[in-house]
Image: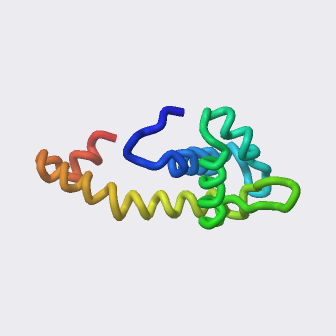
């Protein structure tokens, strides 16, 4: 995984794990890799991965099960997709529209390119 300097590593790890859940790679109720496994595979400190897992727990994407590890929460994929959709509509889409306006691209032009 190539980390970007603009965003904290723990958030980048959390986003990567969310992408795997949203893509259906990990289903509701399925165990996710242990903190140490992820840390070793990414070459980061286990505390960084633990921070990612804490973040995902607070977002109700994964849940801890005492003595068993972390598991994908119910409807985690739905929660992720709803949040990604909200972020796109609130943050990315306005920038796209502004750029389209600057370049003189209409919505009908986009439709014609399908």
Q: Where residue 11 sits in the image (x, y, percent)? A: 51, 51
From the viewer's perspective, is residue 108 above or below residue 66?
above
Q: How is the image coloured?
A: rainbow
Please report the residue visible at 57 percent of the width from the left and 50 percent of the height from the top: 14
The quarter of the picture where the C terminus appears is top left
Q: Where residue 107 sits in the image (x, y, percent)? A: 23, 53
Q: Is 11 left, or right, of 94 in this rendering?
A: right
Q: How many labels does the image show?
A: 0
Viewer-side residue, 59 vs 83: 59
Viewer-side residue, 19 vs 4: 4
From the viewer's perspective, is residue 87 above or below residue 33?
below
Viewer-side residue, 103 vs 20: 20
Viewer-side residue, 66 vs 30: 66
From the viewer's perspective, is residue 112 above or below residue 58?
above
Please report the residue visible at 54 percent of the width from the left and 58 percent of the height from the top: 81
Q: Where residue 33 sits in the image (x, y, percent)? A: 74, 44
Q: Is 55 left, or right, of 40 in this rendering?
A: left
The quarter of the picture where the N terminus appears is top right
Please report the residue visible at 79 percent of the width from the left and 50 percent of the height from the top: 31
Farthest residue, direction right? 67
Q: Where residue 28 sits in the image (x, y, percent)? A: 74, 56
Q: Is 65 left, or right, of 111 in this rendering?
A: right
Please report the residue visible at 56 percent of the width from the left and 58 percent of the height from the top: 80
């Amino acid at each position: 995984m190539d980390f970007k300097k603009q965003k904290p590593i723990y958030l980048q790890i959390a986003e990567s794990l969310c992408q795997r859940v949203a893509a259906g790679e990990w289903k509701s109720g399925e165990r996710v890799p242990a903190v140490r496994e992820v840390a070793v595979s990414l070459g980061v400190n286990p505390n960084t991965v633990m921070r990612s897992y804490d973040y995902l727990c607070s977002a109700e994407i994964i849940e801890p099960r005492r003595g068993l590890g972390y598991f994908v929460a119910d409807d985690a994929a739905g929660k992720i997709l709803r949040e990604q959709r909200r972020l796109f509509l609130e943050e990315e889409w306005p920038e796209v529209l502004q750029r389209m306006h600057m370049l003189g691209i209409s919505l009908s032009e986009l439709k014609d390119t399908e």
